[in-house]
Image: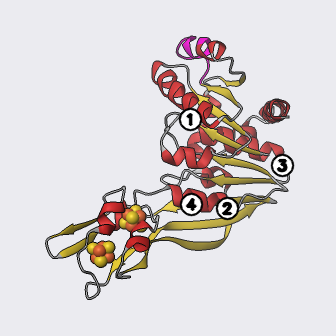
Amino acid sequence: MIISIASGKGGTGKTTVATNLAISLESDVQVLDCDVEEPNAHLFLNPSIKESKTVSTSVPKIDEEKCTLCGKCAEICQFKAIIVIGETVLPFPEMCHSCGGCMEVCPEKAITETGRELGVIERGNRNGLDFVHGRLRVGEAMSPPLIREVRSFVRADKITIIDAPPGTSCPVIAAMKGTDFVLLVTEPTPFGLHDLTLAVEAVKILGIPHGLVINRSDMGDDRVRDYAKQENMPILMEIPFDRQIAEAYSRGSLIIEVMPEWKAKFLELYDHIKQIVE
Ligand code: SF4
Ligand code: SF4
């Protein structure tokens, strides 16, 4: 079972739900924090990190001696990541998607691969819970390859909880694609509703079963609930605004640590998800 926890926008409580769900399940769980631009699940889980590795992607390197300035590499590149200007071929590694097209078409074999560092992957555990997260290099714009690398650690014998990045673009698609269930976390405000509708459209395109958690559910209005009804999307949990929860979050504590009665609610949430998936 792979559950991705997503939200149209940041700050809705996505990581709170992911980490509390994971710890409530106790065993055979792994958490993959795919929010590589701003990973924060480790602040709540406090895993002991055992392993760290740098992840790179291949980008073109030009041998000017061999290059005849034919322009074929620039023609094939859909991302304008390599251009011919005057007497020079200029690659833009930060824009390169590492498709290898330019290397394939170069008639002079003047293009070879070199590495561009994307970030690091760190692995660890907490009382039997497997933990993996990625940290995107500062200044790096291409997060999907690092997210895919984090996802390569999915284990079939575990319940996998993926903390997806916020938003609705390529990074969140890379985190949600191929998962069994998407749990969308939102808050009942106009901004929450706006970004939720975008996230739901993306999940519908991917064809993944999904449900909703409403955080700070006693604030705002009923428009998120009306939208969920209209979309036939189950509301699987509501977390009210609570001073104890807010204080726990600000200290890096889990809800179930300060309010143990919430553990049963997170287990119930998992049971609901399981029923929907099955
Ligand atoms: S590897 Fe692909 S994306 Fe990168 S420069 Fe070559 S053609 Fe463009
Ligand atoms: S395809 Fe090869 S030979 Fe042609 S411009 Fe690009 S690098 Fe030079």
Q: Main secondary structure of the magenta part?
A: loop
Tell which quarter ligand 2 is in.
Answer: bottom left
Q: Which residue is mark 4?
A: 134
Q: Which residue is mark 2?
A: 152
Residue 188 lies in the magenta-colored region: no
For this view, does 267 lie left or right of residue 92? right
Q: Which residue is mark 3?
A: 26
Residue at 63% x, 45% y is 177
Circle 4: element type = strand
Residue type highlighted by circle 2? Ser
Circle 3: element type = loop
Give the numbered dot on residue 7. 1
**Mark 2, residues whose alpha carbon is within 10 Å: few (<14), some, or many (≥20)?**
few
Residue at 62% x, 60% y is 150
The earlier-in-sequence mark between 3 and 4 is: 3
Residue type highlighted by circle 3? Glu
